[in-house]
Image (spheres, rainbow, N blue to C red):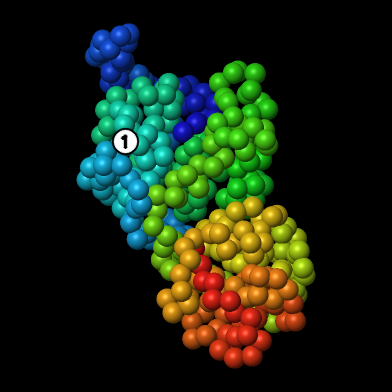
Amino acid sequence: MKLGKHAVRAGLAALSFLSIKIKLILGAGILIIGFLVVIIIGAFQTMIVSTVGNNDVESDYNFVSDGTLGLSPDVEELRPLFEKYAEQYGIPEYVDVLMAKTMQESGGRLADVMQASESLGLPPNTIDDQEYSIDVGTRYFAQVLEQANGDVLLALQAYNFGHGFIDYANEHNNGEYSKELAISFSQEQYQKLKHTGMFSCIRPESAETGACYGDIQYVDAVMQYIQPSYAMDGNYEDVIEVGMQWVGNSDYVFGGGRNRQDQAVGNFDCSSFVHWAFEQVGVDLGNLTSVTTDTLKTQGQQLSYSDAQPGDLVFFDTYKIDGHVGIYMGNGQFIGAQSSTGVDVESMSSGYWNDTFNGRVVRI
């Protein structure tokens, strides 16, 4: 997790009236326990402690998960502590997210298990107590979640980049997260700070794009540990609801819908419409500019049509194999952007869409 320099300077400049006990580990495994009296006045206290613990975090999302995937035993045995501090700071529904973040940050193997030291303006791994790390990390995540107006993906990336990313999102993307926005922010910050030698390109795609500040794949890396059941009320029927606004009010444009101007007037093709609909409920289906039916069919879990539920993706062999995609609504119907109608509801039970449905169903 990286905190922007301006935030660090603001925090350090505001130090007064609060003591922080820090255990410092120095040289060849010799543990020296000392006390560093640090002064913190209201600005810094507000930043990390006081305002996030009063259960008043308001969220546009009700984050619901079906559990976690692939957590190490080291992280899993810390669950009671995550539950304790998530409850204390008003975000009890985010325990799975906190644990998934911890899996990405440390795998449970470090004392600073949530890599929370930098949120206090301290060097990495200064915290040497796992419970204290969970306390600080949970408080900080509650703070950025509040600043992000409950946008979990934006809050996750801000945990990595620092909360300056939220200001950047407010300025450039209506306060919403996107992978493209994360890349742009990382590129700009890296250009400003690369002379310090403090940052490196940790992923191949970072080196290719010059986005070497923080981790542009942080959101995806965290979400791989979450069982998918993520939407505004805990199911993907919300995707259908937001998509219905374009029925009878949109145009099909092959290759359209891949910029905000097209989306604002309802110009979509089938895959950009699916991408847009899921984005409205906080689910990132990859790069908007390159989304296709072929990229969408590799997302999520493949299952049989007999197991299909509202919100699943369904595919059709039209001008090519998997040439068309829509969102299943149940009862043999789907919503999608069709070339003949724009966004509309169609039947898969008979006629053209029954004949071209190829049986592929993907659950995001």
- Horizontal and vertical percent for residue 51? 38, 42
Question: Who is closer to the viewer here, 351 or 131?
Answer: 351
Q: Is residue 280 visible?
A: no
Give me the residue at 23% from left, 42% from top: 77
Horizontal side of residue 129 vs 294, given as left or right: left
Give me the residue at 57% from left, 63% from top: 297
Horizontal side of residue 152 vs 339, given as left or right: left
Horizontal side of residue 66 vs 282, given as left or right: left
Position of residue 47 relative to residue 246, above or below, is above
- Horizontal and vertical percent for residue 124? 42, 24
Query: 10 Å neighbourhood of mark 1: few (<14), some, or many (≥20)?
Result: many
- Horizontal and vertical percent for residue 279? 57, 60
Horizontal side of residue 87 vs 103, given as left or right: left
Specify the amino acid type for callout 1. Answer: Gly
Give me the residue at 60% from left, 50% from top: 178
Give me the residue at 54% from left, 72% from top: 360
Question: Who is closer to the viewer here, 131 or 309?
Answer: 309
Q: In which quarter of the image is residue 25?
A: top left
Position of residue 118 relative to residue 322, above or below, is above
Q: Can residue 109 be seen in this view?
A: yes
Question: Who is closer to the viewer here, 90 or 327?
Answer: 327
- Horizontal and vertical percent for residue 117? 39, 27
Q: Label 1: which residue?
A: 108
Position of residue 318 relative to residue 34, above or below, is below
